[in-house]
Amino acid sequence: MTNHKLKNLSPGWTCELCQQEWKKKPRGKCPGVRLFENMDNRLKTIEQLAALNKKPQGDAVGCLRRGKDWVMLYDPNNVETINPDLPPIYTWNNRPKDLKTPNQLYRYNRKPGDNPHGCIWHEGTWVFLYRWEECPIDDESLPPYREYGTAPELKTR
């Protein structure tokens, strides 16, 4: 945050940095970059970049106001990869159906293998995805996992 770089206009004041306008001199701080009223689809927040395994190389080029806070926006063309060894990145909706999270693997009596086949950015952390057929059995003493209705000779209690 910085001080506004004010310019006096006949109907009021404007800041040359954030491009906001006021009728009276403002008392608040300036974000130092252009303030957008709505999200500019060309720009990304730090969280959106992290979900793509990217981080900004330069300073923010814009911002949004969220309550009392500023959300900085970055140019997605001026980024670098955070972790080049990360497996392919998916969303919950576009991931291959055979890829499972560790919690889903436990339902199949499997434990995650050493080699994830994908990942999803979820609530600020990476969730790795595995092919359940390639994951080792967790507890050999348990009977094998069967989908409901696929073994008619077996009955539920």
Image (spheres, rainbow, N blue to C red):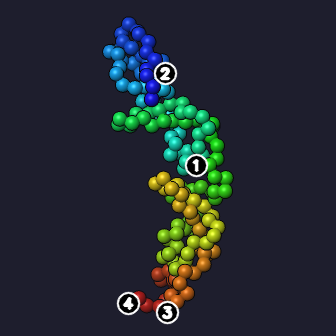
At x 47%, y 91%, the residue is 154
- Which amino acid type is marked by label 3? Glu
Side of 69 where 104 appears, left or right: right
Label placed on residue 157: 4
- Callout 1 secondary element: loop
Extreme residue in the right direction: 84
Sequence order check: which comes first, mark 1 or mark 4? 1
Is there a contact, CB below 8 Å, between mark 1 and mark 4?
A: no
| Residue mark closest to the camera, 2 vs 4 | 2
Marks 4/3: CA–CA distance: 13 Å
At x 56%, y 33%, the residue is 59
| Residue mark closest to the camera, 3 vs 2 | 2
Which one is in front, 61 or 3?
Answer: 3
Q: Residues within 10 Å of mark 2 (few under 14, many from 20)?
A: some
Marks 3/2: CA–CA distance: 73 Å
Give the percent coordinates (x, y) of residue 133. 61, 75
Label placed on residue 153: 3
Which quadrant: the C terminus?
A: bottom left
- The quarter of the picture where residue 87 lies is bottom right
Marks 3/1: CA–CA distance: 47 Å
| Residue mark closest to the camera, 2 vs 1 | 2
Extreme residue in the left direction: 24
- Which amino acid type is marked by label 2? Leu
Sequence order check: which comes first, mark 3 or mark 2? 2
Give the residue pinned by disc 1. Answer: 52
Give the percent coordinates (x, y) of residue 142. 50, 87
Sequence order check: which comes first, mark 2 or mark 1? 2
| Residue mark closest to the camera, 4 vs 3 | 4
